Image: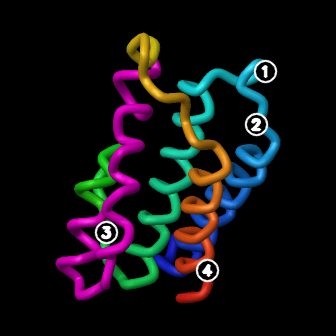
Amino acid sequence: MRKHEEAAELLAVAKRELKSLRGMLDPDVFADEVFGFLAQQAVEKALKAWLCLRGRSYPFTHDLTDLLSRLEDSGEDVGELWDLAELNAFAVQLRYSSLPAGDEPVDRAGTIERVEAVVQRVADSQ
């Protein structure tokens, strides 16, 4: 598969996951850990699509920090995206456990807004 086609496929998956996130606003229906996992996955796919659009390969990783570093190394300005790396915990650790007692609930609306922004930025760079 050519890089542009691969990027389009990854971005389509990120958009599908973002659409699902919009339906997960109720914490009584969807646990924070489930919501956070899907948010992390959407960002991961978007960053991988962005790397593809730049002709770069990406590793099989869930680490948003690694993907952001690769984009930065390829000359992309990702400065305002580093806070998305906070979603890394949802990719692995919190898939098999719960948020620690006393932690603030996930800001779902804010998270959706951040995911939308990165997906749109990648879509605009096609």
Tell me, yes or no, whether the two marked residues, 1 and 2, touch with CB atoms within 8 Å.
yes
- The disc at residue 123 is 4
Q: Residue at x 58, y 75 (%)?
A: 5
| Residue for badge 1 | 29
Query: Type of residue at label 3?
Result: Ser
- The disc at residue 24 is 2
Depth check, mark 3 against mark 1: the one in front is 1
| Residue for badge 3 | 57
Q: What whole-number distance in Å separates the C-alpha atoms at marks 1 and 4?
A: 30 Å
- The disc, 3 or 1, on the residue closer to the chain's N-terminal end is 1
Q: Residues within 10 Å of mark 2 (few under 14, many from 20)?
A: many
Depth check, mark 4 against mark 3: the one in front is 4
Query: Type of residue at label 1?
Result: Val
Q: What whole-number distance in Å separates the C-alpha atoms at marks 3 and 1?
A: 37 Å
Q: How many marks?
A: 4
Q: Nearer the viewer, residue 3 or 87?
A: 87
Query: Type of residue at label 4?
Result: Ala
**What secondary structure is found at the residue carrying circle 1?**
loop
Q: Residues within 10 Å of mark 4 (few under 14, many from 20)?
A: some
- The disc, 1 or 4, on the residue closer to the chain's N-terminal end is 1
Query: Type of residue at label 2?
Result: Met
**What secondary structure is found at the residue carrying circle 3?**
loop
Q: Which residues are magenta?
A: 68-96
Q: In terms of image quadrants, where is residue 105?
A: top right
- The disc, 4 or 2, on the residue closer to the chain's N-terminal end is 2
